[in-house]
Amino acid sequence: MRRRLLLAAAAAMPWAAQAQGSWPERPIRAFVPFAPGTATDNLARVVIEPMGAALGQPIVIENRAGAGGAIGAQAAARAAPDGYSLLFGSATTQAANVSLIRNLPYDPARDFSPISRLAHIAQVLVVHPAVPARTAQELVAWLRANPGKNFASASSGNLAPAAFLVKRLGLDAQGVTYRSPPQALTDVMAGVVPFMFIDMSAVLGHVRAGAVRALAVTSAGPSALLPEVPSLAATVLPGFELLTWMGLYGPAGLPAPMVTRLNTEARAALARPEVVARLLAMGFEAQSSTPEELADFTRGEIEKWRALVAETGMEVT
């Protein structure tokens, strides 16, 4: 009788049984809901190497860009909770989209198993070199003298600081939406659009090459990678700070043993000096957490973005 009960319990919990077994037995797919070269993609490609080595199976990135990351996040949410599908989520997919996309096809608090926070990174305000502004204050003055200018964006992280700047200072400037930040940056470098905010990891090389000029960062203070570039808070928006963050998630219902193992390996990867150094070189600050801490953080960020969207009047699609 006891044997029959045990067998029935095991059959009723296939994922739990697998989690206790030989998982992983094949490569793991990691959805990155943005294009190659974006901050989330750059981060993921650093983190998957040590994690895959520790798990004994490669973690293979699948970029699913579009709809502000909603396409890739939805694909991850609908995947089987068997430990072979993960999501490198971000402030956009797991917090901002709730307020920016009507009928969002997933619930970031309900449809995912939080695993660990990973890192955060500042946005950089950049302009085409032909724009006659070398500081954020000069850009504001130029925009006041030339109403109707456009700015580029491709994610909530790009859009929010621009929308806040325009709203708070009463500027006449309109956003132009692109499929991915690299596409938007290409038009800024070509002079099609004069300015944008973009993740530091995606633009640092172009700033150093002189293809765009950096005027400010969205962190509370200057970045060690761009020490000569002040913060928005120190120039035109006192008290302003907005960081783009990333976290690792699985589909809802991921067995606890898998969550624990993935959390352990993610935190171990982020503790490796060479990983920390690679991330810092791109502008990321590594920041791991427990699954419970990520769940609480996600809920808090959802509410933070509700307030930000309401204040700025950011367009809801």
Image (tube, helix red, strand yellow):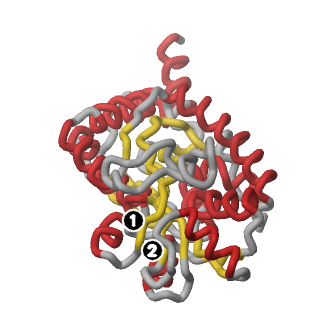
Residue at x-position 28% and y-position 42% = 51
Q: Is residue 26 visible?
A: no
State the residue at coordinates (47%, 76%).
185
Q: Nearer the viewer, residue 306 or 238?
A: 238
Number of residues whose C-alpha sits closer than 10 Å to that of mark 2, classed few (under 14), some (14–19) or many (20 or more):
many
Q: How many marks?
A: 2
**Where residue 143 appears, x then y in whole percent?**
65, 75
User: Which residue lies under the disc numbered 2?
Assistant: 182
Which amino acid does the dot numbered 1 rest on? Ala
Between the C-alphas of marks 1 and 2, the distance is: 7 Å
Query: Which residue is pictured at 41% across the width and 59% down the height?
Result: 200
Identify the element where label 2 is drawn: helix
Classify mark 1: residues with Cα within 10 Å, few (<14), some (14-19) or many (20+): many
Q: Nearer the viewer, residue 45 or 177?
A: 177
**Residue corresponding to mark 1:** 202
Q: Does 308 sit above or below residue 140?
A: above
| Residue 146 placement, left or right of 284 | right
Residue 75: give x, y in percent of width and height.
Answer: 56, 59
Q: Residue furthest left?
A: 274
- Earlier residue among tags 1 and 2: 2
For the point 18% across and 43% down, which residue is it? 274
- Numbered label attached to residue 245: none
Quadrant assignment, res 155? bottom right
Residue 63 location (% of width, % of height): 44, 66
Are the two marked residues, 1 and 2, in contact with CB atoms closer than 8 angstroms?
A: yes
Task: Judge from the rendering whether residue 150 lies leftward or rightward of residue 306; answer left or right.
Answer: left
Residue 58 drawn at (x, y percent) = 26, 52
Q: Is residue 195 above or below residue 19?
A: below
